[in-house]
Image: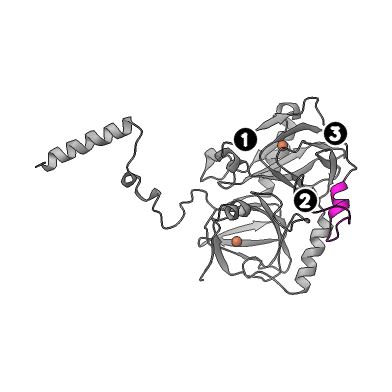
Amino acid sequence: MLTEETTAQALDALYAEMARLRIQGLWQLGDEIQATRPKVRAVPYVWRGEDVRRVLLRAGELVKHSEAAERRTVRLVNPGIPESHSATHTLAAAVQLLLPGEVAPTHRHTPAAVRFMLQGHGAYTTVAGERCHMRPGDLVLTPRMAWHHHGNAGDEPVIWTDGLDFPLVILLNATFWEPYRDGLQPETEPADASTLRYAGTLRPGWRRPYTSPRPMLIYRWEDTDAALRNLARLDEASPYDDVLLEYTNPLTGGHVFPALACFIQLLRPGVHTRAHRHTSSAVYHVFRGAGYSIIDGQRYDWAEGDWLALPAWAAHLHVNPGPEEAILYSISDLPALEALDLYREEAVPQ
Ligand SMILES: [Fe+2]
Ligand SMILES: [Fe+2]
């Protein structure tokens, strides 16, 4: 018969041996596994546009492009997960500056990237031999392992915001990065060819739907804006997002990337959405207007030029209290959650 003391001693010895052997009892993990809801360390957070721009332009003065590890980019780092260098646990958000005449050399990598153009004229990104001209409001895609470089052929600084799925790629131990051997890839395709070929709902009759390489690399702001207006005219809207559109692969109708989706939404004046939560996380950029979001009971004000991180499973709603329209661009990890059969969404009573 074991006494309480000898049992405790025996257990200590067992746990010590298990630790030495790298074996763990499920009961030792506590609620890490048997959690009734996701444990999310990322927090809601707003990065002010004026702060980001000030820092970035100062970096433009102080950090030569050649010293900036190929890209003069600042990352938006969620204070809840600073070690991740990312805005949510799956999404990296960054802001990039190119001064007139600068070129960021060609490279490629497994993380997929999207660029939403914010400011300045004359910028371009060349993706897989196709030069994509970037004007404010345009979205440019860089698929996995597509060679790409950026340039500023204009006479003013250009700024865009990058979105990447790299935290997920790192988690999956699938990160590869490669510089182009001779500086810049050749431009082998006509400029803006993919959007000239595929934008809209008509497809060249002799081309069949296919998914790789991605057929459309640029989504023009005028098309996006027109689509928002058209939907608003129908008075059709999501109760959680108001007039919401997803950028899609025009040949499949699906998300733009396997682990990254892009959205644009119009919050009409006076709109106050209902609240919901979902297992996908998002990073918003306020392209136009001002308003606020209530996330897990706390109010986050935002205005044109700001970024907002929405962690997974946080209850949220959006409000545009003013007389002007608000337009939010966002990236989301929704496709990854869907692919893994982990997407869940529920309404949250107010
Ligand atoms: Fe890149
Ligand atoms: Fe949502």
Count up the numbered dots. Answer: 3
What mark, if any, has residue 37 been given in the picture? none
Instruction: Specify the principal SS of the magenta part.
Output: loop
CB of mark 2 within 8 Å of CB of mark 1? no
Check the image and report above or below for 138 versus 109: below
Query: Which amino acid, mark 1?
Result: Thr
Picture coordinates of residue 228, whole percent (x, y): 77, 65
Instruction: Name the secondary structure under disc 2.
Output: loop
Can you tell which quarter of the image residue 98 is in? top right
N-terminal of the pair, mark 3 or mark 2, is 3
Q: Which residues are magenta?
A: 192-211
- The residue lying at 80 percent from left, 39 percent from top is 128
Check the image and report above or below for 192 versus 252: above
Question: Distance of mark 3 from mark 2, alpha carbons?
Answer: 36 Å
Instruction: Tell me if I can see residue 228 in this picture.
Output: yes
Q: Is residue 213 magenta?
A: no
What mark, if any, has residue 101 been given in the picture? 3
Can you tell which quarter of the image residue 146 is in? top right
For the N terminus, the quadrant is: top left
Residue closer to the observer: 221 or 202: 202
Q: Is residue 197 magenta?
A: yes
Instruction: Name the secondary structure under disc 1.
Output: loop
Name the residue tied to disc 2.
Answer: 210
CB of mark 1 within 8 Å of CB of mark 3? no
Considering every residue shown, the one lying at the far left of the view is 1
Q: Is residue 222 left or right of residue 273?
A: right
- The residue lying at 13 percent from left, 38 percent from top is 6
Name the residue tied to disc 1.
Answer: 175
Instruction: Name the secondary structure under disc 3.
Output: loop
Query: Which amino acid, mark 2?
Result: Tyr
Check the image and report above or below for 193 versus 152: below
| The image quadrant in which ligand 2 is located | bottom right
